[in-house]
Image (cartoon, grey):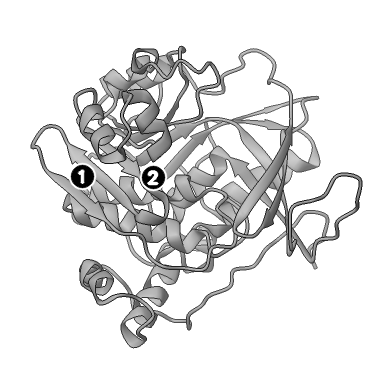
Amino acid sequence: MTTHDGDKLTAGYHLLDPLADVRRPGDADCDVYLTGTVFLDIIFTGLDSAPVRGTESWARGMGSSPGGVANMATALARLGLRTSLAAAFGDDHYGDYCRDALDHGEGIDLSLSRTIPGWHSPVTVSMAYEGERTMVSHGHEAPPPEEPAPSCPPPARAAVASLVPGRGQEWVAEAARRGSRVFADVGWDDTGRWDPADLTDLEHCEAFLPNAEEAMRYTRTDCPRAAARALSDLVPLAVVTLGSEGAYAVDGRTGETAEVPAISVEALDPTGAGDVFVAGFVTGTLAGWPLADRLAFAGLTAALSVQEFGGSLSAPGWVEIAAWWQHARAYDDQPARALRRYAFLDRLLPAAARPWPLRRAVPTIGFRQA
């Protein structure tokens, strides 16, 4: 496991350990394990509108960062969780850049990842405008074994899985058997079936976190809250994100429900916001927080992420969260209800060292270090 001290504590992201109160001698070194595809994300910013066919558009800004599953891994690591990622990396410059950014830049354990000679890294170009994004991706499947995940995942408090309709992933069941609490999201079902029976790994999961559209399609309902209640019959904890309305959760074991409104922010780029939401919810769950606090914290971290461009680069750490909370209490740009909802942050946060709003660096490849 990669250590989280010394030069790994970059940019103040690990000022506190959210699991300090629940750690015990003999616990697993890894807090969260995940696997998937790492993309090199190239993000064009400063576009006034979507590109128009037959014309050339100039962007006022550009950045690059690891993307794909790296968005989730980075969000978890910046919240202080000891994160292990199994992924394939190309032996090209893109792969070197992504590996270095995740290992040395974020302190993510990559010991279960592999570098594939002669395989080029998948690439996504993202164009952000009007709070939305358009993406173009290119890549080839990694040569066998295609799945970078080891057949036996490491001992971990939790695992995060992206469910694939119609295809089970052996490592998910094994992680659950080994005591990991499995949190799952899901992508768009290109088959159009939207049959919950196709989500074979759901039986191994503690929590399922789809968005409202996905939840309603899987449950054949026309209300996301009804969808969450229906999903709680299939998985212990169903969490449905409601976009600008916030999020709603149902604990099928206790019958408890929680709904938290979204924080009002200026959205620049939604890339990776769903991953950041899951990371925030996982953090609060492992720390043993009440359901409503977990939901609020996840929504807050996602809201902070959309104020920045890029996926992994936009994930907030504790410094950013503390700066927002300090600002929110000093100014009246958030409803009083929201401030009451986030009062639990007082017992968690370090003193903010920088003013709000924060602007994180947007690094890119190609520059030589001095």
Q: Nearer the viewer, residue 119 or 235?
A: 235
Query: Residue drawn at (45%, 70%), measured in percent from left and top?
Result: 320
Residue at coordinates 53% horizontally, 34% vertically from top-left?
A: 111
Rendering quarter of residue 322:
bottom left
Quadrant (top left/top right/bottom left/bottom right) for the N terminus = top left
Reading the chain from its start, which is encountered first: label 1 or label 2? 1
Q: Visible in this render: residue 148?
A: yes
Type of the residue with mark 1: Pro
Residue behind mark 2: 278
**Looking at the image, which residue is at 43% across and 43% down?**
83
Residues at marks 1 and 2 touching, judged by CB atoms closer than 8 Å: no
Q: For the residues marked 1 and 2, what is the alpha-carbon distance in whole angstroms?
A: 27 Å
Residue 115 position in % (x across, y down): 68, 29
Q: Is residue 108 visible?
A: no
The image position of residue 54, as x and y in percent, is 91, 45
Across the whole image, how many numbered discs are drawn on residues? 2
**Amino acid type of the residue tagged 2 in the rendering:** Val
Q: Residue at x 64, y 60 (%)?
A: 130
Q: Is residue 118 above or below residue 185?
A: above
Query: Which image quadrant for residue 113?
Result: top right
Secondary structure category for the residue under label 1: loop
